[in-house]
Amino acid sequence: MQLALAEIRRRRGRWASITGAVAFIVFLVLVLAALADGLFIGSTGALRNSDADALVYSVDGRRSLVRSQLPLAMRADVAAVPGVADAGALGVLLATATSADEAIDIAVIGHLPGHPGEPTRRSSGRPLGSGERFVGLADESLRDEGVALGDSVLLTGSSQPIEVVGFVSDSQYLLADTLWVTLETWQALRSEVRPETIGRGDVVQAIPFTVTDGVTVATVGSAVDAALGNTETVTTDEAILSLPGVEQQASTFTAIIAVSFVVVAIVIALFFALITLEKRGQLAILKAIGSSNILLLRGVLLQALIATVAGYGLGFVLSRLLAFVLPAAVPVEFLPRTALTLFVATIVMGALGAVFSFRRIVRIDPASALGGEA
Amino acid sequence: MTAINVDDVTKIYGEGHTAVRALRDASLELRDNEFLALLGPSGSGKTTLLSVIGGLLAPTSGRVTIGDTALAGMSKKEQTRFRANRVGFVFQGFNLVPFLTARENMTVMGSISDAPRSEIEARADQLLDELGLTDRKNNLPEQLSGGERQRVAIGRALVTDPDLILVDEPTASLDTELGTQVVRLLATEIKTRGKAGIMVTHDLRMVEYTDRTVRILDGELLDEA
Ligand SMILES: Nc1ncnc2c1ncn2[C@@H]1O[C@H](COP(=O)(O)OP(=O)(O)OP(=O)(O)O)[C@@H](O)[C@H]1O
Ligand SMILES: [Mg+2]
């Protein structure tokens, strides 16, 4: 141990460079992970922070909150299925609004206040009353667009401004800011913004529901599909992953991050392979005076641990600094859980890389110290 | 008691027509408290003999017994522990660890040998004093003179209080006065602590501090009365 630490202390330059290399990769990985988390959070908030256990879609809607169409009357049928505690309704209208001369995408989500499907993370203002018209709850992200409590939002194509009476957090839908209104308001807005929908009757996109204690969501879901026919019921978790792009994004980022970790292991492995080669003479001396392979391996592991912990720390700080200069529109989220996972992964990969040079250390013949003029 | 028994040891380096016979049927016995001088010209096999005794090189044939354990019977691991705990080897090229200070080059034995670290530290300070290195203890090998490096190497060999002291050319880089002082220290260690020691030397003046002289020529040992 003393040996491993002394080496780092007296060969600072070289250890700074390996720490820097690790820091750079960790920085990239942390930023990528934050982007992945940001995209996931920004895409899925509307469903993730819902109290519904499952959602009923139409079969031809293929699990899409935009394509699916169900008659509102089905809500009563769903509620009547044994095991269903309560059912709500969700209607989605993708619209634009103008704020500070800039067009912003807004997903207007109609729901039934007090029933499954409503946003659960209210951050300020008051909740919506049942059937209340032309008032809404805005996602916190709309604050960045200059929307404040009491302001009104006017959708393009609509004549009816909606007063923001409260804010909810983490309720975005596919990176669009959301505005939560009653089903009644939503229907009125839809007729104005999308006139072609007039006359389709009381159609909503999905029927979210909760189940009673002691039953499984899957069983109740099958019962709902059996009772209604032509519906596809999925759990909320499945619905989140079925949102367009979410699963693909997650797997793409996971692949990039996994490759980066392989790079961490390779960088550490190459570094230790190089310095082991260079230190062959010293290692032979240490073996000649009685160092065991295990003792030398412990030293190498300790050094790898120090390089990766320091590299991670530096990369972490750099990634946080970047967050300050990134424009607010870039959806990055630095989650402690992700940071911790990546920390553990960095250390494990560093150790793997270091262990790689163990074979080389074992092969060094202590007798080769005899020729050395080290 | 017999400390070292070298019985009919032959060491051949390499194979075929490049083979070098560095030791030929060498036999040698050393008792506890005995200090032996090994004299011989360059290339005669002095370093090879010390390495075979110190468990660094396996002989091609013959047996080496230290105390009552045969080196050949030891596993690789046991040989490593043997070198760490029972042998103090001063290499011809000193072989200090370049990024450790003079004192650290000695105290590093605290992690390598089984001796308690506190004991090693205390002994290192005492040896630094006896070897006249106290002022230089925080210097790296590259900042030390040849003679100072050599004394650090001697300190490292003695710090674990080993049973065997094997010294390859301890006085080559030292002037007579310092050389005498170092050899005296080695002799005292061997006499007062029940060790056995072999010192390779070219310097006939150092022989007077040893009990016995053995000459080596082309790998053959010739006892001298
Ligand atoms: N690793 C090796 N491979 C091949 N030959 C070797 C090896 N080491 C030593 N030799 C040869 O063995 C013989 C004895 O070498 P050794 O190092 O024991 O001599 P020495 O008496 O210590 O010499 P010096 O006084 O120069 O240190 C020499 O001929 C040398 O060239
Ligand atoms: Mg020699």
Image: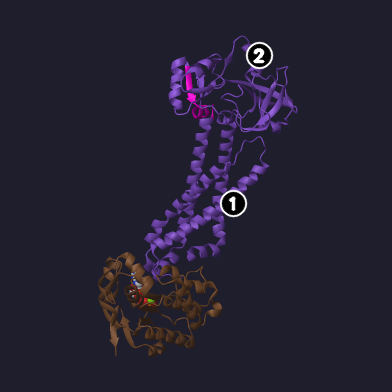
Chain colours: A purple, B brown
Q: Which chain is indicated by disc 1?
A: A
Q: Which residue is mark 2?
A: A191
The residue lying toward the viewer, choosing from A152 and A366, is A152
Tags 2 and 1 both on a single chain: yes
The residue lying toward the viewer, choosing from B103 and A38, is A38
Q: Which residue is mark 1?
A: A314
Percent coordinates x, y for residue A16 in the rendering: 57, 57
Regarding mark 2 in the picture, which secondary structure is present there?
helix
First of labels 2, 1 by sequence position: 2
Q: Residue B184: say if magenta.
A: no
Q: Residue A243: say if magenta.
A: yes
**Number of other residues with Cα within 10 Å of mark 1, as a class: few under 14, some 14 to 19, many 20 or more:** some
A306 vs A368: above or below: above
A336 on left or right of B57: right
Whether residue A189 is visible, yes or no, is yes
Percent coordinates x, y for residue A264 in the rendering: 50, 48
The residue lying toward the viewer, choosing from B20 and A287, is A287
**Region rendered in magenta:** A231-245
A332 on left or right of A281: right
Q: Which chain is indicated by disc 2?
A: A
Regarding mark 1 in the picture, which secondary structure is present there?
helix
Three-letter amino acid code at the position of disc 2: Ser
Taking the spot 37% from the left edge, 60% from the top edge, the residue there is: A363
